[in-house]
Image (cartoon, coloured by chain):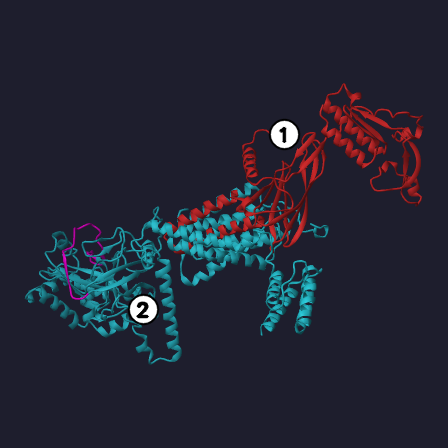
Amino acid sequence: MRSSARSRYPFRPRARLERAVSAWARSRQGEDHAPLTLRSRRIYILPTRAGVVAVVLLFIMFLAGLNYQNSLALLLCFLLAGFALVSMYECHATLTGLTISSARVESAFAQGHGELQLGFYNAGDSTRRGLRLRVTAIEPKSFEIAPQSACLLSLRYEALARGRQRLDRLHLSSDAPLGLFRAWTWLHLPLEALIYPAPLRLRPLPPAAGQPQRSERARRLGGEEEFAWLRRFREGDPLRRAAWKAYARGGPLMVAHYDAPAGAQRTLSLQSLRDLPLERALSQLADWVLECERHGESYALELPGQSLPPGHGLAQRRHCLEALALYEA
Amino acid sequence: MSAALIGPEAQAAEPAAAPVTAQRWALAGLLGAVLLNVHHIAAWCLPVALVGAAWRIWGARRTARLPGRAVRIVVVVILTLAVLVSFRTLNGLDAGASLLVAMMALKLMESQRTRDWMIVLGGALFLLLAACLASQTLWLLPLYAGELWLLCAGLYAVGARHSQASATLILRAAARNLLLALPLALLLFLFFPRLTGSLWALPQDDEAVTGLGEQMSPGSISELIDSDEPAMRVRFDGPLPPREQRYWRGPVLHRFDGFSWSRVHADLGAPPPLEFTGSGYRYSVTLEPNAHGVLIGLDLPRGLLSEMPRVARSFDDLLLAGEPMRSAVSYRLDSFPQHRSVGALPAPLRELDLSLPAARNPRTRELAHTLRLASRDDRAYVQAVLGYLQDNGFEYTRTPPKLGRNSIDDLLFKTHEGFCGHYASAFATLMRAGGLPAHVVTGYLGGSWNRFGGYLLVKQSNAHAWTEVWLDGLGWLRVDPTAVLDTNQLRGDLDDTEDIAGVAGARSGIARWLLATGQAWQAVNAWWQDEFVSFNSSKQFGLLNRLGLKDGDYETLVALLALGGAVWLALLAWRGRGLEAGKPRDALGRSWRRLERSLRRRASARAPHEGPVAYGERIAGERPELAATLRTLTREYAQLRYGRRCSLARQQRFDRAVRLFRARVRR
């Protein structure tokens, strides 16, 4: 997995340097576990580009004061230098003592985006401003936390390839108050996302076992199952199954419920896709799983070496996708 | 963290556009900086800045389109040309500041992002620097400080990173950080090694500096007499010299063209050796900026006591700094009113001090011949000329009539009215015509005592001119021809408020108070000039001496800086120590611990498993006389700590109640 991650990001010296320093930081501070309060030992700080410019400008001011032998100009320059240094302390303090109270990562499909949730708690008595959180290559999230309050932050991450993806390097930084310095820390939380194969539609669904004659209407609706009854609309129901006519008559919104014919279950097996390359086959299986879930059909998954019994619902979906994610030939 | 705590505190980021409030801070800061520079920049700069600001305010209200790139480039070129036309250069403080104002006004038109506004604030800080370079007058200091505060607040507002902090909060944060920075700034100010010269040549200001100059023509001194500006301040180690000895010797003028006298800068060798007798005076002088570059001292300084590089003694016994003094300088001298040149006058100098323009002032030459023939020796000739001036109805006036081409003839035979410069000029001419080497000395006479500052203030209005005549065997002799005229008038003019105690006796209380206030202000100003404005390398080492670090060098300074800086940084770090544990400064907890401590001493300690209310109940049982208060207090604490609402005011009430309770049990 790691090698594929590296191949997606070509050689970038800055990123490589960051990785190296981060690895050093990791070897220094070990793995982190939420809840975690940031100590100053692990907070690094450097001037930003604006900070470097400010240093140059201060130096010019200093030279001017020195050359004109002007005491007031020198004092002004020294005051500003002190001001910038105080702001450095303030910048450092925006991270010191911040608590990361929780960290959770959600699975995602390869090449898609997953979600990462982090809880923060600011026990201090001033607002922590200018915070930025960055994970992998997705755009950073800026936020601030009011004094003595918590916040939950969800952050998108880029899912790379099928399998396990570690998101153990989070970059939390702050450039408050003036933007002259940036303090940052790396969070090495044991966050591991399971990356499902990206769904890919190559073949139609395999026929259900023991399939009876399908009604014309069922075929027209695109489903593979028999119309059973109408039930109340629940959130998440596909809209194309809504009984719009009944709704228009003033009744509640109903959806047509189809029952998979008894015993009508599909077996999704890798064997049937032998002719496809492995990754594509797994992607096709993932697509079928989603498709079956969409129709509320029950399905079984057969992979060489393991088979999941038929079923449907969120648990079945998760089990199947996990099996696909972790499948090794 | 429980779900209840997860609130909307996390605010979404916005792009780098600066909020409108931040823009207002930056605008106000820039305008303030422009106003502080208004006295030395081109006149059109202020309107340009105002137009830029107005544009910006208008543009912020409705989303006006900002001018395009081409327009901006054209405006840049026009404004640069305008500066060039106004100053004939882009170099120098005034032109530079004008250009900066113009560019910042222009920058306003394209400022949108945070970065742009940071640049505007940076430009404003540079303008503040330019204002400091242009003037270090004491009364401007509060304005400078206010402007710095405003600009730092602007930095906070622009840089505050997507938050809507209130103005009070921003101002307070800026003030707090400036105050925190002040110790470091003072440390650097005192101990950062200073240069003794300039790094690069400074562009010459064509602005005239009031004071003595290279030349003296009839009337040039009377311009100075009207000036109330200070020329120098003198602090004596011992008693003051008597009034008639307070001749402050400045530029010596040798060359005479019949109308005006001028200095000679050629190197005519070493002055004749001097013999100093009698008692001397040791004193330190703060000399205001001047064009002549002479370290003025009491007639006649033996030498420089303080370290000053590149100071040399000229052939006419002046201590020359080598260049015009751009800022006030301080130095220490010791002077001996009684001195005598030993040895002969070097030939080139004799020649110089005898030369007179041919075909000018014929009647004066005639007079000189007549008087010379009538005199036994050189000394008698000097007396004869002084007697001539005294007896022929010459008058001292501050508004002398204009003189013609033969200025001395006009003065001696037509107008009979003149000023010190006129008489010095006439006297020196008569001496030269009579064969005695002579030159005109310009400087100051007198000075007024400031009792608050303990110094003698010499103003430009004390400017004076006299002569020195060479008498073989006696050396240079100071002769003040003006002094033989109506001396009372001279005194009345030149010694103003010599001693307010005496003068003020006759005046009303308010006048006395005003005088005293004026003097006190002058003294504060003098302190500012002496100790702050003219703080330099030698003062720095003087400070080291006073701190007990004898023969300190640059390494000592650097070591002191490093030490002080480390202490400052440590103090800053110590300020933030509570942050480390992630604990708030828990005022409520402190109050509670205070209560517990006092109960532990008088009753019993709280068991680890006991909650506050249970503990309160138990102690109430042990000490029934405290029961009522104690129950209220412990309940209140539980409410505050674990209850839903916990206002700051209620916490403070609780704290006060705990303090009262403690005071009660103590009794």
Is A113 displayed left or right of B180 in the figure?
right
Q: Colour of chain B?
A: cyan
Q: The chain shown in red is which?
A: A
The location of residue B155, given as percent across then percent down, is 54, 52
The answer to whether residue A12 shows anywhere in this view is yes
Is B383 displayed left or right of B522 in the figure?
left
Q: Quadrant of residue A325?
A: top right
The location of residue B119, given as percent across then percent down, is 52, 47
Q: Do marks 2 and 1 share a subunit?
A: no
What label sits on residue A2 in the rendered view? Answer: 1
Hey, what amino acid is under mark 1? Arg
Q: CA distance from mark 2 to mark 1?
A: 80 Å
Q: Quadrant of residue A5?
A: top right
Hey, what amino acid is under mark 2? Gly
Determine the chain carrying the residue at label 2: B
Q: Nearer the viewer, residue A119 or B534?
A: A119
- Which element type, helix, strand or loop, lies under badge 2? loop
User: How many numbered callouts?
Assistant: 2
Read off the residue under disc 2.
B454
Structural crowding at the residue carrying mark 2, measured as other residues with C-alpha within 10 Å and reported as few (<14), some (14–19) or many (≥20):
few
Determine the chain carrying the residue at label 1: A
Question: From which residue to which does the magenta span run?
Answer: B253-279
Is B198 displayed left or right of B147 in the figure?
left
Is B230 displayed left or right of A295 in the figure?
left
Please determine whether, in this image, residue A288 is positioned above or below residue B528. Answer: above
Structural crowding at the residue carrying mark 1, measured as other residues with C-alpha within 10 Å and reported as few (<14), some (14–19) or many (≥20):
few
